[in-house]
Image (spheres, rainbow, N blue to C red):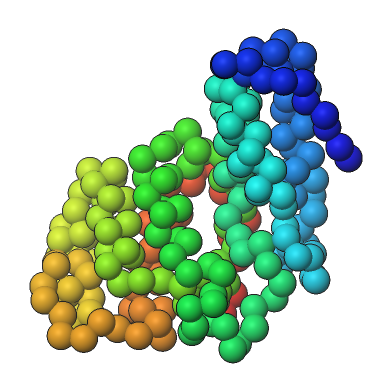
Amino acid sequence: MEFTLPPIGRNGTQVKKLFPDDIIYMICRYFCSHCNNEYQLPYGPLTGAEKAQDSGTLYNLCLISKLWRDVAEQTLYHSFHPDYSPPRKRILKSSKNPWKLRLEPFLRTIASRPDLAGSIQTVIIRDLVIYGLHFYESQRAFDECARALRTSPREIYYKGHHNSAPSEIREAFFLGTPISVLPDVSTLASEIAGELLSALVAFVPKLEHLAVEG
């Protein structure tokens, strides 16, 4: 399916006039796997698919005008999932992981944009995502999520975690205490990933499908 757009005015007015609102919605939905039911839920995108949806095109549609941005952006946030082939073990702990540092910015966005958080209907967390976490970026994202919920990591810690076994990593994560050595990806996955997932779920009121794959 191809679309040829006319020259765009300063505010995207020509394109806006060419397409009524319902057509803009249809165009954006065409590039969304969630809207086209291209999932084998609860197991994620179709096996062997190079990409689950055309996120690049949706991003470009956001640049046409404010109207297009509002529609395309909402569609872009229908789902969060690795849009790559099934993960290969050799890239999970390397710098080649295509989903390195992807969950943390996503959390910061939905914490600051309730309108986008309300669009999310599918979340698929795979080991590509978990092994792409970074301690300080995860800490920053969790802090912003906590503040958006009108609390703090420290308050969350003392309400539910202080009675558990002492952990230097968890104390550093929640309380900001010094940490001697940054945790490796496996330790992050076991100590921190669950906290980030809890924060994510707190912001997605319309979530229909959640899959966590190890």
Which quarter shows the N terminus? Answer: top right
Q: Is residue 164 left or right of residue 211?
A: left
Q: Nearer the viewer, residue 155 or 26?
A: 26
**Residue 198 image offset from top left, x and y in percent:** 40, 61
Q: Nearer the viewer, residue 87 or 78?
A: 87
Residue found at the far bottom of this picture: 90
Picture residue at 15% right of the left edge, 85% below the top: 180
Q: Is residue 106 left or right of residue 35?
A: left
**Residue 182 image offset from top left, x and y in percent:** 25, 82
Number of numbered discs on residues: 0
**Residue 67 image offset from top left, x and y in percent:** 60, 21
Q: Quadrant of residue 124?
A: bottom right
Picture residue at 32% right of the left edge, 63% below the top: 137
**Residue 163 seen in render:** no
Q: Is residue 44 left or right of residue 80?
A: right
Picture residue at 79% right of the left edge, 65% below the top: 49
Q: Nearer the viewer, residue 208 or 47?
A: 47
Residue found at the far left of this picture: 177
Tell me if residue 43 comes above or below residue 106 in the rendering. Answer: below
Picture residue at 60% right of the left edge, 87% below the top: 89
Which quarter shows the C terminus? Answer: bottom right
Q: Quadrant of residue 192?
A: bottom left
